[in-house]
Structures are given as C-alpha cells and as structure tokens.
Amino acid sequence: MRKHGMILLLAGLALSLPALANPFEMVLDNGMKVVVKEDRRAPVVAHMVWYRVGSMDEVDGTSGVAHLLEHMMFKGTPKVGPGEFSKRVAAAGGRDNAFTSRDYTAYFQQVPKEKLAEMMALEADRMRHLNVDPKEFAQEIKVVMEERRLRTEDDPQALLFEQANAVAFQAHPYRRPVIGWMNDLENMTAADAKAWYDRWYVPNNAILVVSGDVDHQQVFKLARQHYGPIKARALPVRKPQLEPPQKGLRRLTVKGPAELPVLLLGWKAPKVEQVEGPVEPFALQMLAAILDGHDAARLGRSLVREQRLATSVGASYDAMSRGPAMFYLYGSPAPGQTPEALEKALRAEVERIAREGVDEAELKRAKAQLIAGQIYKLDSVFGQAMEIGSMEVMGFRHQDIAALQARLEAVTAEQVQAVARGAFDEDKLTIGLLEPLPAAAKPPLAAPGAARHH
C-alpha cells in the first residue's frame, strides 16, 4: 500500500477508536463550560482553562495587556505566593504554562491523574483571587518589555511581520501586536492589568477542558466543587470591529540587520464561519498544503531546489480565527537573486495552479499530510485538550472537529484550482520587504501569527 493510502486508512481507524470518540460536556450554574475527554492509555491528565479573550479585545493605549495579565497570573493569591503556582505543579510531578493569542488566553497543567483536584484548586483560586501587586507588576512589565525587544525589535523578520500586519489591517484590532506596542507597555499600570482581570476572567467567559485517565463524572464533581462557587459577572458588550474593504495593493519596507532580504505577501482571505459554510477556506487550507505542506511541496521543490531562487520559502493560512484571515507567501531570495524575482516566482506558483490545476496524486499527498498531522495532534492527552479547547474558544463545538476534517478531506482538485483563480485579488494584497542592513545572521524565517507564551 502506498504511504498516503496507509495514512488515510490509519486516519479512518483512529477516528473510529473509542478513545477518540468520547468527549463529555456540561455547563456549571455560573456559565463555565466543562469538556472531558477520557483517555486511559497513560495515568496522566491535562487540565486547561481557556478564556475567550485575547489581544483583539484590547483598546488603543493598552495593547499588550492580555499577554501581561497572563504573566501576572503567576504572581500569586492570598493563598499562593508569587511564583509558588509553578513550584506546586512541579512538586506534583507535572508541567505548566500559558499562552496568549489574538483570540484567546489559555492556561494548562499536565500532571499525574491523582493530582487533578489540586490543579483545579490552584486554577480556580487564581481565577477569583489574583493579587495584582504594584511591586510585582513593576518587575513583570520590565520582563515583557525585554521580551518585546528580544523577540521583535531585535529580530527584523518579526518586525517585518508586525509592521505588515499593522498595514494590512487599519480598523480591525488585529493590527495591534499581541506583545503590545512599546509605548503602551511603558505607560501601562497595575490598575490596567487589574481592570483586564476583573473584566474578562470570569467563569462565564471560560472553558475548562480535561483530558486523560479520568472518569468524566468525577471530573464534573470536582469542577462543581472548585469552579462552581465562583460567581458569574456580566461581560462587556463586544461590538463588531469590521475591517473596511481594501481598495488597492499596499507595500511597505522595513530596514534591519539581516544577511538576506525577506519578502512577505499577504492576501485577505475568507475563513471558516460555520461547518457547512462555503468551501473556499477548506480549499485554501489544501492549497497551502500543496504549496508548503511537506518536503516535496511545490514552493520548496521549485524555488529552492530546482530554480535556486530562494534560500527559504513558505505558505501560511489559518482558517480558524475570531477575526479576519490572511493567506501568506514568504521567503528569502538566494544570494544574487532579487526580491522582485522571488515575488514574481511566488506569484507564478499560484498562477500555475490556477491555470493548470493539480493532479490527484499531488492532492492525495497533501491530504495525507494534513490528516496525519491531525492524528498525531490527537495522539497525546495534551494534544486532545488543545484541539477541543481551541475549537470551543473560537465559537465552534468540539463535536465539529470530525465534520471540519471531513470537509477538508472532501476538497477536490477542481476546488483548489478555483480558489487559486479567485482568492488572490491584487486589491486585497499587502507586500512587505525586509531590506537588510549589515549584521550577523538571524534565526530562520517563521510563519506569522504565533501566540505569546509565558
């Protein structure tokens, strides 16, 4: 059996296994949703709390407060001192962390199953009783500003993505970086962080996801015990903040220390609004996989290995987001090649698919890689909790996971060709160029849109 056929068979078998078909859910009286995924393969459990709030909910002048509050969540409560939270998780034989994105903020612990009640007690305590001490804040804001300097201001590639994002979006809050603008960080106060916590960190804005070697009824009981007493509070009204239609190509140049230029092309694109919605977002996911989803994908094969126009190339598209979606092509021209030549070549690869389409073998390879990635994500209790939580916090249901994958598997070669013809409107395009200044080598190019971790 060919490799892609074997992966498709494994995918079908994996989706039929009881271990992957049993999430249970309930809603506490205070509005907090609880989803439990039983998986008895190892005596461990992943415990995650997802808040439906991210940097897109910030307002001008306080950019970065969502990520800053994530840091402050480790600074203690009346019961648990600063830094003590992670020490207790480590003492329990586990690991913990948190991450902030444009769309959500999440906290997790992965521990031996007998420590679940202790993790719930710790997480529920800081949901309700966080100390936002001005002295701790004064130290942590310095940490975040240093993180911004290291990860963005001293990294020209990251700076290019940030600046291009701010040009692509003019009205939508996605224009602001998750880490925040430096001026906002310099002027942020402990009161700003406390206001954010009071406004958004309430049970009716949170989803609890537990996966692993547990009994769902016991988890529900523990959730009622630890999270149930926390009172719900009215949430702020979320007004729609729609990006007005882009009416022409936008270009920007960022100068910074780098060995080679970096080119970024980003088109505004449709996203998945509902499971049974239009096919275009699913076809765009498949197009991205055909261009850059595996070692033999088109961009790397054609532009790096065959034509030697680029040292690195990539395609990126996230169909699931609370705000607008973007489809990116990016890369660095090889020494002696120009950004203009690389731009022309990147566009040509999409145009070739629009003109000639893709053959079934190529489509099957791309599908096999996407399906394999999905199965591998679900191979751990943490991966299962991540998948469930990210679906729920985006406004979908965990029951939609299989249906969304089925939509992706059903994409045809004709639909990929059609989206290559219709989705790349010049008037929806933003092009960013990193113009190198003399400097030492920089890290490899990464896809845009990464979340910020504690």
Image (cartoon, grey):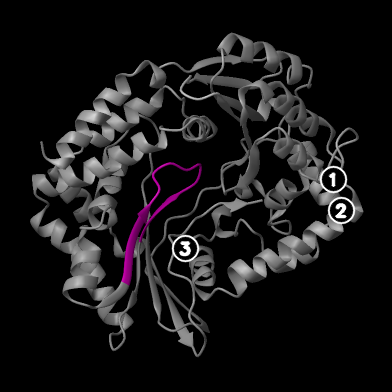
Disc 3 packing (10 Å; few <14; some 14–19; many ≥20): many
Residue, disc 2: 136
Residue 453 against residue 43 in the figure, above or below: below
* Chain-order first, disc 2 or disc 3: 2
Q: Nearer the viewer, residue 246 or 105?
A: 105
Q: Residues within 10 Å of mark 2 (few under 14, many from 20)?
A: some
Residue placed at 55% from the left, 21% from the top? 35
Q: Secondary structure at mark 3?
A: helix
Residue 222 lies left or right of residue 335; in this view the side is: right
Q: Nearer the viewer, mark 3 or mark 1?
A: 1
Q: Which of the two labelled residues, at mark 2 and mark 1, occupies the earlier sequence position?
A: 1
Give, as a single range, the part of the protein colored magenta: 312-328
In the rendered structure, the answer to whether residue 253 lies left or right of residue 360 reads right
Q: Amino acid at mark 3?
A: Ala
Instruction: Look at mark 3 in the image and give the residue it sits on.
Output: 168
Is 327 part of what is drawn in magenta?
yes
Q: Residue 222: x percent and y percent? A: 69, 15
